[in-house]
Amino acid sequence: MANKMKSKKAAKKRFKLTATGKVKFKKMNKGHIMTKKSPKRVRNLRAAGYIAECDAKNIRKDLLPYG
């Protein structure tokens, strides 16, 4: 019997797979020091980002083999 592949723990914490198979991530620069950032910028950072399909293939295949 073949061994199971392991998911990379770092990738597991940073990325989520959507139902359609896209790779979703939280945008950077929203951790702290919000005072110097404009409200528009902070508001836009709330929305999730999506990885480009060319990079998403590698993440799905190598880093998150079981989703």
Image (cartoon, rainbow, N blue to C red):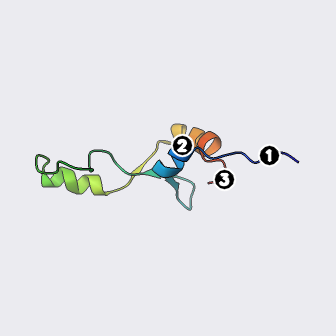
Numbered circle sitting on residue 3: 1
Q: Residue at x 29, y 57 (%)?
A: 46
Q: Amino acid at mark 1?
A: Asn
Numbered circle sitting on residue 56: 2
Spatial CA span between label 1 and label 2: 24 Å
Q: Is residue 50 left or right of residue 34?
A: right
Marks 1/2 in contact by CB < 8 Å: the verdict is no
Q: Secondary structure at mark 1?
A: loop
Q: Secondary structure at mark 3?
A: loop
Q: Position of residue 48 (x, y in %)?
A: 37, 55
Q: Position of residue 13 (x, y in %)?
A: 48, 51
Q: Which residue is identified by label 3? A: 66
Q: Secondary structure at mark 2?
A: helix
Q: Amino acid at mark 2?
A: Ala
Q: Is residue 6 left or right of residue 35?
A: right
Q: Is residue 60 left or right of residue 48?
A: right
Quarter that holds the C terminus: bottom right
Depth order, front residue of 5/44: 5
Depth order, front residue of 4/21: 4
N-terminal of the pair, mark 1 or mark 3, is 1
Frontmost of labels 1 and 3 is 1
Spatial CA span between label 3 and label 2: 14 Å
Q: Amino acid at mark 3?
A: Tyr
Spatial CA span between label 1 and label 3: 13 Å
Numbered circle sitting on residue 58: none
Marks 1/3 in contact by CB < 8 Å: the verdict is no
Depth order, front residue of 12/44: 12
